[in-house]
Image (tube, coloured by chain):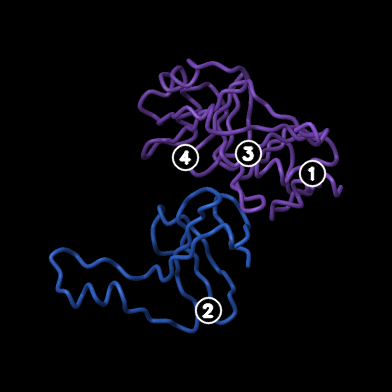
Chain colours: A purple, B blue
Amino acid sequence: MDKVDFISRRENVSLAAVMARKGVTAADIGGALAFEVPKEPAYRSGSGLGLVGTGPGTWLALSETLDNEWPSALEAALGSLASVSDQSSGYAMYRLSGANARELLQRGATIDLDPLAFTAGSAATTVISHIGVAFWQLDDTPAYDLVVFRSMRESLEHWFESVAASL
Amino acid sequence: MRIPCPYCGDRDSQEFVYRGDASPVRPADPAEETEFFDYVYLRENPAGPIDELWYHAQGCRNWITLTRDTRDHAISAARLTSEGKSA
């Protein structure tokens, strides 16, 4: 993302999809991980772990280091509560930061990103330019992290560059 | 049109796949072919409130049961289909 100064690739991150088994609640998962697991579309982080709510009983889990063993460790910690699948190479991840970040996302996503409606900790799974993405707001800079299926990376980067050029 | 997803909040209808009337119930096995014909093909097409199925394919990937008035598109209820078909 050399052409857009407020967007950078994030490569050294581990990702895993977590899906609760039948009857297991966010609180049950939170108990096993000693973590406040969001039951709404939200992002929570702490102790090197991040969780993004992507649907009822489903989350995208993040570790801020690239570690092949981490998804297995997460699976072991959750035991029979949830299924875990490594997504580290399944998604491309971006950091968007600064005033232009909100404007750019708002030109793509048909959800309200105004600070009154979407704040630090808010997350959304949606589409930008017909491409499925998930993004969440980290702070009030505003800074966002965004993931896209790896095979759609070039198309989304093209969209980033086209829209950023018009800002 | 905006669809109020119970998990994601208000979303553009383009994120959803429309599946139609939520009221038909699969006949208990064994069933007559005529019963299956009714289940598969016959729809009421009412002018008024109707329960219908929408799949949030490009969001939380859950089935949603909406109560929508076919005359003015006013949506009076939305719930996850996994939590039960009726309001």
Type of amino acid under label 1: Arg
Question: Which is more toward the observer, A136 or B85?
Answer: A136
Q: Residue at x 55, y 69 (%)?
A: B76
Q: CA distance from mark 2 to mark 1?
A: 36 Å
Q: Residue at x 44, y 82 (%)?
A: B46
Q: CA distance from mark 4 to mark 3?
A: 27 Å
Q: Earlier in the sequence, mark 3 or mark 1?
A: 1
Tell me, yes or no, whether the two marked residues, 4 and 3, touch with CB atoms within 8 Å.
Answer: no
In this rendering, the label closer to the viewer, 3 or 1: 3
- Mark 1 neighbour density, 10 Å: few (under 14) some (14–19) many (20 or more): some
Left or right of A89? Residue A121 is: right
Count how many numbered circles sit on residues in the image: 4
Type of amino acid under label 4: Gly
Q: Position of residue B37 (x, y in %)?
A: 24, 76
Q: Secondary structure at mark 3?
A: helix
Quadrant of the frame with the N terminus of chain A: top right
Please name the residue that numbered disc 1 is placed on: A102
Residue B70: mark in rendering: 2
Q: Secondary structure at mark 4?
A: loop
Residue A57: mark in rendering: 4
Residue A153: mark in rendering: 3
